[in-house]
Structures are given as structure tokens and as C-alpha cells.
Amino acid sequence: MAELRGALIGCGFFAVNQMHGWRDTAGASIIAICDRDPERLQIVGDEFGIAKRYADAAALFEGETLDFVDIATTAPSHRPLVEMAARHRVPAICQKPFAPTLADAKAMVKACTDAGVPLMVHENFRWQSPIQAVRAVIDRGEIGTPFFGRISFRSAYDVFSGQPYLATGKRFIIEDLGIHILDIARFLLGDVSTITARTARINQAIAGEDVATMLMDHASGATSVVDCSYASKLAVEPFPETLIEIDGSNGTIRLAQGYQLTVTGKSGTTVSDVSPPLLAWASRPWHNIQESVVAIQQHWVDCLTKGTEPVTSGADNLKTFALVEAAYAGAASREPVQLDALLK
């Protein structure tokens, strides 16, 4: 079967990882790139040998025959680009945050559904191999039925030097990082019925919140705590590791710093190293995120080839996006927020 022909829109900070990932993805290749910034367009085009370069997305869709488009721009441009892809009947994979508002996200899902084209959100944290290892333990029933989880990302890493726009928005950690951690909670424990949230801004040089703590009721009956911080100075910087605790009816799972997975369950206690592979183009400490980029892009290609729905489809991601909106609403009101009303 011929390789799928894709285009990348947006050649910024994270898009370089996606371009490396496409090189490692079987069954697809990027044949064109698009960015309004001529310098970024040249840098990425030269590095990856892409001759077809566009400064305008409309010209890209008119000028190329595409099997998919990878949208790696910032959130305000996602809706017009996804809707443009839908009008051209081109499947789209969209970077997160999915959209500026839940209403925009719903409109994007509807546009692609009406056009009959797949839409997936590049929600890659759940695809990190250590987190996949936690899910595999749950799936094989080693700890019985999960009833409690804690998914934690606490760090003092300077994310602002590489992405300075993160310091200027009124929303920060829940929208940029918490969306991933909330999605992991859904991935491991199922959909959420109620969320209670508290936020704080410790770093006074930024506009948004840099600490968030969220308590969630899952439809499965489990309870989880999701906590995120970019203001936590630790003896050994854990960035960008997500630490996980899952308690079940027959045992426990602990994913600790350094990618150490301890499982106590029906078979006793086992300790294993679930460190992600260091790909040839990757660099520490980003390698866990970088390898997950390849995993999610391969999943996308496989789904397009087989005609199946991606697990992080636009429709599924609405449930994660609703958690973000509910967390901000709950932090403002200091009251629990029901998810059902947001998803209608």
C-alpha cells in the first residue's frame, strides 16, 4: 500500500518533534509544510528536506492532494484550520489545546463528522510507554478493580524560555499541562462525573495559574486526585515525568520518579524499569514525550489505513476538554462541577 501523503501546518517549537516522529512512522510521510513565518518555514524545510513550502494554509489545500494534515499551530487557529481541512475532505490530527473554548471544539468535531473525515487530537501523554505500562497492569487484572488514583506532575522546570507565550495567558497550567494529566486519569480510571478544583499563582512573573489540584469522581466509582505544579523545587528535578498511584481491590501500582514501576497484587510484588526508549533524534529529559509522539502518530496512520476511530478522536477529547473547562469553573466558584451539562 502506498504511503499516506501528509502536510504539517505550523513549524514552531513542538512541530520539530512531530517532523522527527513522522520520519519514524511507518506508512506515511510529510510532503509539504506550511507556516506564516518564512524563517521557521525555511529552518524546518531545510532540516527535513521538504521542498513544498506554503505561507498560507488555503494555498496548501488547493495546491496539494493530501491524505491527512497535521495541525501544530496554537489554539486560536485550530478551528479555522480544522474546518478548512473538513471542507477539503482531508482528515486532520490537531495539536492540543484542541481549541480556545469548548464551543469551538464541539464545532470542530461537528465539521469533521458532517464531512465524514477523521479528526484526532495529538493528546500524547497517555501514549508514553511508562503510562501504557500502568494501563497494561490494570487491564490484566493484577490489582483487581481500581478505586483510587493519584496522577501527579510537580516540577520547577523553566518551560517559559522555550515557549514564552505560556507566561502571558490568563490560563496556564491546567490548559497547557493539566489537560494531559486529566486525560491520563480518564485513560486509567474512566470518564469523570464531578470535578472539584483549586488553583494558585506562585510565580508572580506570569499571568496564569502555575499550581492546580483537582479531585474527581469517576463513573466507575473510583476517586482520583490530579495535581500539577511548575512551582515545586525538588532535590532531583522530575520533569517531564508523570508520577502515578493506583489502588485496587487486590493491590496497588506505583510509577515512581526514575520510571520505576512497583506492582503489588495477586502475584506478589514486582519492581521493573519502564524507562522510555531514547530514540536516535531524542534528547533527555524530553525523550518520554518524544517517543510518545511516534506512538500516537503511528496510531493515527494505522487508524486511517484500517478505517477505525482513533482512541484520542476529537469526540473523545471533548470529554478531556470539558474537564479543563470544569476545572477552571470550579476553581473560580470553589464548588464541585458536574460534567454532564458541559457535554450536552
Image: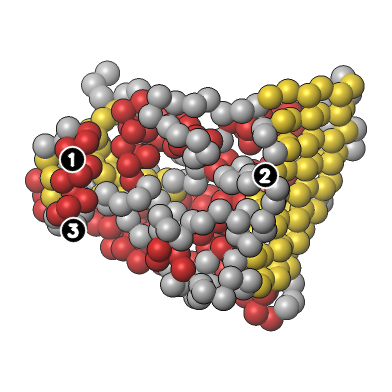
Q: CA distance from mark 1 to mark 3?
A: 13 Å
Q: Position of residue 279 (x, y in %)?
A: 44, 26
Question: What type is the residue that disc 1 sits on?
Answer: Gly
Question: What type is the residue that disc 3 sits on?
Answer: Arg
Q: Nearer the viewer, mark 2 or mark 1?
A: 2
Q: Position of residue 229 (x, y in %)?
A: 64, 59
Q: In the rendered view, would you say 172 is above or below 159?
A: below
Q: Is residue 206 left or right of residue 246?
A: left
Quadrant housing the N terminus: top left
Badge 2 vs badge 1, beta-carbon distance below 8 Å: no
> 327 or 45: nearer the eye?
45
Q: In the rendered view, would you say 271 is above or below 300?
A: above
Q: Closer to the N terminus: mark 2 or mark 3?
A: 3
Q: Which residue is mark 3?
A: 36
Label count reads 3
Quadrant housing the C terminus: bottom right
Q: Position of residue 258 (x, y in %)?
A: 67, 34
Check residue 45 in the rendering and tell me which mark sits there, or answer none.
Answer: 1
Q: For the point 84% across and 46% down, which residue is it?
A: 147
Dot 3: few (<14), some (14–19), or many (≥20) neighbours within 10 Å? Answer: some
Q: CA distance from mark 2 to mark 3?
A: 40 Å
Check residue 142 in the rendering and tell me which mark sits there, or answer none.
Answer: none
Q: For the point 32% across and 56% down, which residue is it?
A: 73
Report the residue that reaches farthest toward the bottom.
333
Q: In the rendered view, would you say 242 is above or below 233?
A: above
